[in-house]
Image (spheres, rainbow, N blue to C red):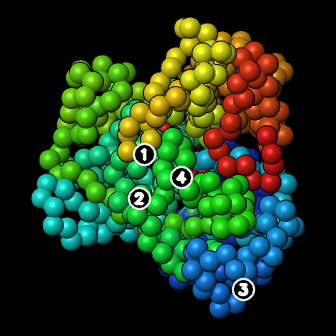
Amino acid sequence: MEGQPVPLRQRTTLRTGGVPTLYVEASTESQLIEVVADHDRAAGLLRSGDTQPADSTSDWQAVPSASESSEPGLLVLGGGSNLVVSDAPFDGTVITDSRSDLLVRPHDREGSVLIEATAGVTWDDLVSHTVTQGWSGLEALSGIPGTVGAAPIQNIGAYGREVGDNLVSIRAYDRLTGEVVSLPRRDLALGYRDSVLKRSLHDERPGGGRTWKNTGRWVVLSVLLELDEDGLSAPVRYGELARTIGVEVGERAPGSEVRSAVLELRRSKGMVLDPSDHDTWSAGSFFTNPILSQRYADEVLPFKAPRFPVEDAGRDPLEGKVKTSAAWLISQTGFEKGFGLTPGAQARLSSKHVLAITNRGAATSDDVVALARAVRDGVEEHFGIRLEPEPVQVGLTI
Ligand SMILES: Cc1cc2nc3c(=O)[nH]c(=O)nc-3n(C[C@H](O)[C@H](O)[C@H](O)COP(=O)(O)OP(=O)(O)OC[C@H]3O[C@@H](n4cnc5c(N)ncnc54)[C@H](O)[C@@H]3O)c2cc1C
């Protein structure tokens, strides 16, 4: 199961990243857990035989935060499509889950189907399969790179849908307690590009008293989704998509038509991976859309700035909050499509839209960081709004 430790730039879509000390491909759940547990034990994060319940706070305060200590790191790697990785050697273990299994679970609710996919399944393979089967719910999430295991981490979303709309629960290995747990959707605190899983990277509360850095407290083992069986898509919520399909917003359409339209729209923006197209050598959207208090938005946002309601995981609008468009802020600040810091710069904004930072072939992680900082700082100076990077930062800080 030990694989060749090639540079991580060969395993990330932004194509940066140095060589890890150890690279492991796990082909069973027990191998995956064993490698993670061995790492965590050696790093002092999990003691031998430790099986304390998740809410216990008796011992953990004495353990140093992973982000503050200098122990070798752990990175559970999916498709490498939401990462900005330093080109320096990665002092630690990189592990991928090579399982690719799908199960249809017994279910007594008529008109819907329950499917469980292991973490290593390629996300878009799953979407394609469900659309072919006439199972609907995921079609608007067509073409998103990466794996099933990473999908709930930032509650992937596009064209008015999020994985949380169909997620029932996840099975995960809890690195804090050393136990395999089932976490229902309501425990995941899913939000816009956010979840308790993602927050545990940098927030001690979900982290159980420490932060976990590259990979969060929970290693996702499998994901359980509930889909409709009638072949029609979920209601189309996104205007541009509705127009492309030729339906009204809120109407349903055959799942295969929605998938084709989404793939077409995504390709036009460089958002479908293509090795021959540098506009797709990215981590997708580099910054999340800022969420502001209504009062702050009224103060700093020009009248013509886009404003979207902020919904909670139950899709109820959150009062007093407003979301604006990071892409709009970036272009209004003066950064154009294709912008680079110097004429021949290898890290540049996508030539198709300003929200993706792309590698034109030879960009280093330093080049990416410099461009990201310039964009973030430029927007902050212009609008007083600080953009937050969406990808997970490994071995570097933007
Ligand atoms: C061209 C392009 C378009 C994109 N479009 C979208 C989009 O429309 N919407 C969207 O939401 N995202 C989008 N993304 C971002 C990205 O595809 C998603 O965030 C995706 O879910 C990342 O999956 P991955 O397997 O590549 O994760 P990786 O990049 O490998 O890892 C990301 C994080 O998840 C953790 N992780 C991975 N697997 C597991 C696991 N099994 N258990 C625990 N932690 C794990 C990693 O440790 C890391 O912290 C896009 C990216 C690209 C390059």
Query: Three-letter amino acid code at disc 2?
Result: Arg
Specify the label residue 47 is tagged with: 3
Q: Which residue is mark 1?
A: 313
Residue at image point 62% right, 61% down: 206
Task: Report, in whole angstroms, how far the alpha carbon at label 3 lies from the one at label 2.
Answer: 29 Å
Residues at marks 4 and 2, CA–CA distance in whole angstroms: 10 Å
Q: Which residue is mark 2?
A: 185
Q: Earlier in the sequence, mark 1 or mark 2?
A: 2
Quadrant including the N terminus: bottom right
Q: Is residue 119 above or below residue 345?
A: below
Residue 252 x/y as whole percent: 20, 33
Q: Amino acid at mark 4?
A: Ser
Whether the residues at callouts 4 and 2 have beta carbons within 8 Å, the answer is: no
Residue at image position (84%, 21%) is 342
Q: CA distance from mark 4 to mark 1?
A: 10 Å
Label pair 4/1, CB-CB below 8 angstroms:
no
Dot 4 alpha-carbon crowd within 10 angstroms: few under 14, some 14 to 19, many 20 or more: many
Q: Secondary structure at mark 4?
A: loop
Q: Is residue 97 visible?
A: yes
Q: Amino acid at mark 3?
A: Arg
Q: How many numbered marks are there?
A: 4
